[in-house]
Image (spheres, coloured by chain):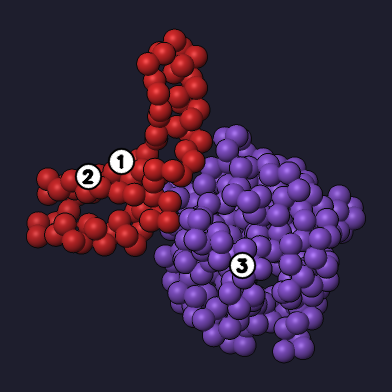
Chain colours: A red, B purple
């Protein structure tokens, strides 16, 4: 089984990379871009029976820094 | 006075840190990150700069889960001294020993230059010799030095006089120009600038030497 963890900087936390990407897109003429946030996607191959709670614990303890980042978990 | 310098894979300021501590009179032991215990009788644990574990996932995140980091947390919980510089500061925030987090510089660039720091509190064994309001020259060398903390946490740091150093002009976008902070018991300092690279005039500045001398002196007196 697989799980996909998406980690993003929390709303309100400055995202320098997102700001740079936005600036580049606007410079290329994509005038409709209002905001860009950049995060990371982590895919996990898991033994059968690994619970969503286990993955949540992984996020809390290592995969995300909850001081500045939020995460979401998609099982399967 | 006994100091331990932690070495992670990718640490690259560990020997500089040892040189600075020895110059101030400390007996220094290098400690590999796989060691689950610190040498007995250690007064100070220094977490050096570098790129521990290649900065994978987040700067300091993997190092914070190394066996030695638990020993470091225990040392701090016992009231021991700790100094984290640059990547070491990132490790201290990732372990939760110090509050907040360090993210990418606002200008996206790696910054390597000497900056002016203002000493914001003299009330610690790290900063006492400078005096509050003193300006010192210390080099920075980082890509993720942009200090972030929630508003309540920031108010708490300010209210408890725990901002050790501020940038005279913030190079990296750090909140409240914060360059270094103290723990509640004022025995743990995390800072992005490198005092260990500023211990002799022929390095460009010797303004960092007083920090190490004061720290070693405090441990000897304790």
Parent chain of label 3: B
Parent chain of label 2: A
For this orientation, the residue located farthest to the right is B201
Callout 1–callout 3 Cβ contact below 8 Å: no
Which residue bears the numbered disc 2?
A4
Q: Is residue B83 above or below residue A8?
A: below
Q: CA distance from mark 3 to mark 2?
A: 41 Å
In the image, taking residue B98 as reference, residue A34 lies left or right, namely: left
Q: Nearer the viewer, residue B46 or B99?
A: B99
Residue A14 at x, y percent in the picture: 49, 41
In the image, taking residue B194 as reference, residue A69 lies left or right, namely: left
Which residue bears the numbered disc 1?
A41
Q: CA distance from mark 2 to mark 1?
A: 7 Å
Q: CA distance from mark 1 to mark 3?
A: 38 Å
Res B155 → quadrant: bottom right
Q: For the point 72% across and 89% down, which residue is it?
A: B222
For this orientation, the residue located farthest to the top is A29
Helix, strand or loop at mark 3: helix
Which callout, 3 or 2, points to the residue nearer the camera? 3
Residue B16 at x, y percent in the picture: 72, 60
Q: Residues within 10 Å of mark 1 (few under 14, many from 20)?
A: few
Res B20 → quadrant: bottom right
Helix, strand or loop at mark 2: strand
Q: For the point 66% across and 68% down, which residue is it?
A: B161
Which residue bears the numbered disc 3?
B159
For this orientation, the residue located farthest to the left is A49
Callout 2–callout 1 Cβ contact below 8 Å: yes
């Amino acid at each position: 089984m697989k799980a996909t963890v998406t980690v993003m900087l929390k709303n309100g936390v400055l995202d320098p990379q997102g700001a740079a990407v936005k600036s580049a897109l606007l410079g290329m003429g994509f005038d409709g871009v209002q905001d860009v946030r950049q995060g990371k996607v982590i895919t996990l191959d898991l033994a059968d029976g690994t619970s969503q709670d286990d993955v949540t614990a992984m996020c809390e303890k290592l995969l995300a820094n909850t001081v500045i980042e939020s995460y979401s978990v998609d099982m399967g | 006075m006994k100091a331990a310098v932690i070495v992670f894979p990718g640490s690259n300021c560990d020997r500089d840190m040892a040189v600075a501590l020895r110059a101030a009179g400390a007996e220094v032991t290098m400690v590999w990150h796989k060691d689950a215990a610190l040498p007995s009788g250690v007064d100070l644990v220094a977490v050096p700069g570098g790129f521990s574990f290649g900065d994978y996932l987040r700067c300091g995140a993997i190092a914070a889960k190394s066996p030695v980091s638990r020993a470091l947390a225990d040392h701090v919980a016992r009231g021991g001294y700790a100094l984290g510089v640059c990547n070491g500061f990132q490790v201290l925030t990732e372990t939760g020993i110090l509050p907040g987090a360090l993210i990418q510089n606002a200008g996206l660039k790696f910054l390597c230059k000497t900056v002016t720091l203002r000493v914001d509190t003299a009330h610690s064994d790290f900063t006492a010799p400078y005096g509050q309001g003193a300006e010192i020259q210390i080099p920075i060398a980082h890509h993720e030095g942009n200090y972030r903390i929630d508003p309540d946490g920031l108010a708490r740091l300010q209210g408890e006089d725990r901002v050790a150093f501020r940038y005279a002009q913030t190079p990296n976008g750090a909140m409240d120009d914060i360059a270094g902070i103290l723990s509640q018991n004022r025995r743990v300092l995390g800072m992005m600038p490198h005092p260990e690279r500023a211990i002799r005039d022929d390095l460009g500045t010797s303004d960092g030497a007083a920090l190490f001398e004061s720290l070693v002196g405090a441990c000897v007196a304790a």
